[in-house]
Every structure is written in C-alpha cells, then in structure tokens.
Image (spheres, rainbow, N blue to C red):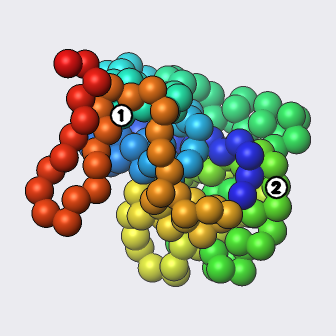
Amino acid sequence: MPEKIVILRLGHRPQRDKRITTHVGLTARAFGAEGMLLASDDKKLSDNIADVSNRFGGNFYVKNDVSWKTEIKKWKEDGGKVCHLSMYGINLPDAVPEISKCEKLMIVVGAEKVPFEIYEMADWNVAVGNQPHSEVAAVAVTLDRISSTDPLRTEFEGGELTIVPEKCGKNVIDRRE
C-alpha cells in the first residue's frame, strides 16, 4: 500500500454536495488516507471533518480551496502518482497491482463533470465498475483493495471517543470525562 495517500475532491458545490463530500472525506480517513484536498471553498466542511478527527482520533486533514491543477503538478513533481476514479478507464482489479507499488498516491474523485485534462494528467484512469456509482463507494473500494492490511481494523490514536465493538448495543469510551 502506498505510504502516503491523499484524496483530491473536484467539483464540490457547497449547497448541493456537502454531505457527499463530507462522506468522501470521512471514508478516506477511515480507510487510511492522510488527508483531502478540496478544490472548492467550504470551510465549514473542513471544520466538520477536523472535528471528527479530534473526537475519534487520527491526523486526517482537509486543505480547503486548492487549485486542482497546481496540486496535481506539485504532487507529480514530488514523485507522486495520480489515480483518477471514474466509471471509465481500466478496471480496478487490473490496476491494483501497479497502484499498490507506488509510495505516494493522490486519488482524484469528481462531483460534476470532470475536466478532460484530469484524464490526461492521471497516471491511471480507473473504473470502479463500469456503471454509474457513488464516489464514496469508489474511494472505499479502492482504498480497501490497495491496502496491505485490513483498513477496517485500524486503530486511531488520540481521540476523545473510542467505539468498542459489541455484538449488540453501543459501547463508547469517552476520555473527556
């Protein structure tokens, strides 16, 4: 699995996409990404995801209002690879062996029509199924597939709250008390 993974979220429309983009960020956090770059201005969304990280642990960040083109160029200049998730491109299972080998990975997910330039700048255009789907599901499936460990068993350090798995009911350790 790449040592460093970030998500680049394109086309976020604050009034329309706030829940989906929040879920992209939360899913990325839960499945092992270190942060999300938001190519839109939505400070409230950034703050909400930071609040989850504070409460449940980990160091996930959101960098708000970035230039997607600048971020991709910087990433590639620093030796990173770019994977654009779509329903077009090579099938995810065929791309996993190669993607898993890179050290730094930027995963690009769109909300609205993705500029064609993204397809040209990406090292991989990956189809997470060749059908319309949710970008949240695409991020989860991709991060799960490229992980060398089970991301569902990750323990997050430093949180105020820890959920303890139970067969029935809720068991939450609250360190604020």
Q: Which residue is depicted at the point 63% across and 35% down?
A: 68
- The front one of 159 and 49 is 159
Specify whether 165 is left or right of 105: left
**Where's residue 126, x and y in %?**
64, 69
Specify whether 125 is left or right of 58: right
Q: Which residue is depicted at the point 28% across and 45% down?
A: 163
Disc 2 residue type (three-letter): Cys
Quadrant where the N terminus sits is bottom right
Specify whether 64 is left or right of 4: left
Reading the image, the residue beneath label 1 is 56
For residue 154, above or below residue 56 = below
Q: Which residue is depicted at the point 45% across and 26% down?
A: 158
Nearer the observer: mark 2 or 1; the answer is 1
For residue 45, above or below residue 23 = above
SS class, disc 1: helix
- The front one of 115 and 173 is 173
Quadrant where the C terminus sits is top left
Q: Earlier in the sequence, mark 2 or mark 1?
A: 1
- Picture mark count: 2
Query: Badge 1, how many Cα within 10 Å: few under 14, some, many 20+?
Result: some
**Where's residue 131, x and y in %?**
45, 79
**Where's residue 85, x and y in %?**
58, 61
Instruction: Work out whether residue 147 can be spotted.
Output: yes
Reading the image, the residue beneath label 2 is 102
**Mark 2 near mark 1, Cβ–Cβ under 8 Å?**
no
- The front one of 117 and 137 is 137
For residue 71, above or below residue 10 = above
Query: Badge 2, how many Cα within 10 Å: few under 14, some, many 20+?
Result: some
Q: Which residue is depicted at the point 75% across and 63% down?
A: 100
**Where's residue 5, x and y in %?**
66, 45
SS class, disc 2: loop
Disc 1 residue type (three-letter): Phe
